[in-house]
Image (spheres, rainbow, N blue to C red):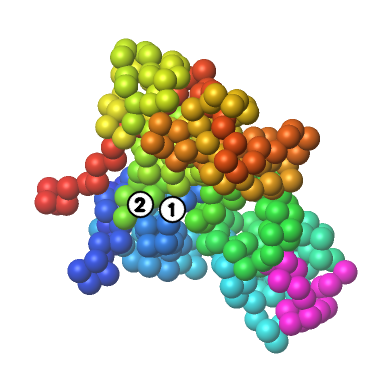
Amino acid sequence: MDKSLSIRQLVKDFGTTRALKFVDLDVPAGSFTTLLGPSGCGKTTLLRAVAGITDPSSGEIYLGDRRIDRVMPEKRNFGLVFQTYALFPHMSVEKNIGFGLEMRRVAKPDAQRRVQAALELVGLGHLAKRLPRQLSGGQQQRVALARAIVIEPDVLLFDEPLSNLDAKLRDGLREDLRELQRQFGITSIYVTHDQSEAMALADEIVVMKDGEIVERGTPVDLYRRPAYRFTAEFLGLTNVIAADIAGSRCLLPWGAETRVENPGAKAAEGVAIRPEDIGITADPEGGGVVTHAVFMGASTHYNVDIAGLNLRVVAAGGQAAILEQGQRVNLTPPPALHLLQTFAPMREAAE
């Protein structure tokens, strides 16, 4: 059975507010797709529509060639992992995990085998008899993940499942989650507003804003070669600079010249330079002045005033000498820069 997802012209209205605006999206079978965007962009509404928790106002959703937007949620065979764990407090870990199998009337010997296998997969075999209140937050989220996997779903849906965990637990569970997804090859959609989480997990990131998809691509492509300013600024720190463009050459405001890697693009929003791509060196005659310096261990973050601009610069390595506030510097741009286009929101008058 084809387990790819196809979303066609999906619209969701809440009263007079349009949360989704004719969204088209294909999720290949076995892939891990992350929906990334700020609060209110429509990513959770889209996930809930795919899950069947929210009915779309119009549009279609397909699993392979089977239309599912009119299918009851419990008939879609989708696994869901939520931010709030949603465990039954009166049930043990193993009973929480096996609940979905019980509802599907799976034979008891088979259900017990699958529950035990799921427990071992998430490293909780020794906690099978405990209640949720006796577990840490990370352990509870592992139970929720095991419960979603044990039913052998066609699709896994994640709604910010790691946001309630501390940083160390989040990093560890993120790695485990990605490894499990790869192991089973389950088509997955993951909602987050955390850029680093999206880049660490996704085969493809779908950037959303105001109910629309701005752009989509691999983490490397969207970070290094975003089409739009919104993507460049949302996916990590960046400097957006107005520059003089002549063919494939770019003259920056402080006099440095570099190459343009996409000279045919419309450059209404200027060029994007990631802070870590700017070279910074002390120079008593330099055109820039350090206005702020923060040592972060593996790197130092600077603010530099130069040619009327305030630029973010990140120098990697804790061994290098730390430049001080007020020190004059030279800045060196990367060998090539990427022109940004202006994102044009959909005109709904054509509805």
Checking the image for residue 53, the label placed there is none
Q: Is residue 273 above or below residue 40?
A: above
Left or right: 262 with respect to 328? left
**Quarter of the image where one finds residue 142:** bottom right
Q: Is residue 262 left or right of residue 33?
A: left
Of the numbered discs 2 and 1, the one sitting upstream in the chain is 1
Q: Residue 109's quadrant in the figure? A: bottom right
Q: Position of residue 126 (x, y in %)?
A: 88, 69
Q: Is residue 135 in the magenta section?
A: yes
Q: Residue at x 37, y 13 (%)?
A: 248
Residue type (three-letter) at the residue carrying disc 1: Gly
| Residue 209 circle label | 2
Image: magenta residue range: 126-143
Q: Residue 145: give x, y in percent of width and height.
A: 66, 62
Nearer to me, 348 or 189? 348
Q: Is residue 203 left or right of residue 9?
A: right
The answer to whether marks 2 and 1 mark residues whose Cβ atoms lie closer than 8 Å is: yes
Kind of residue sitting beneath label 2? Lys
What residue sits right under mark 1 in the picture? 37
**Image: 261 above or below 214:** above
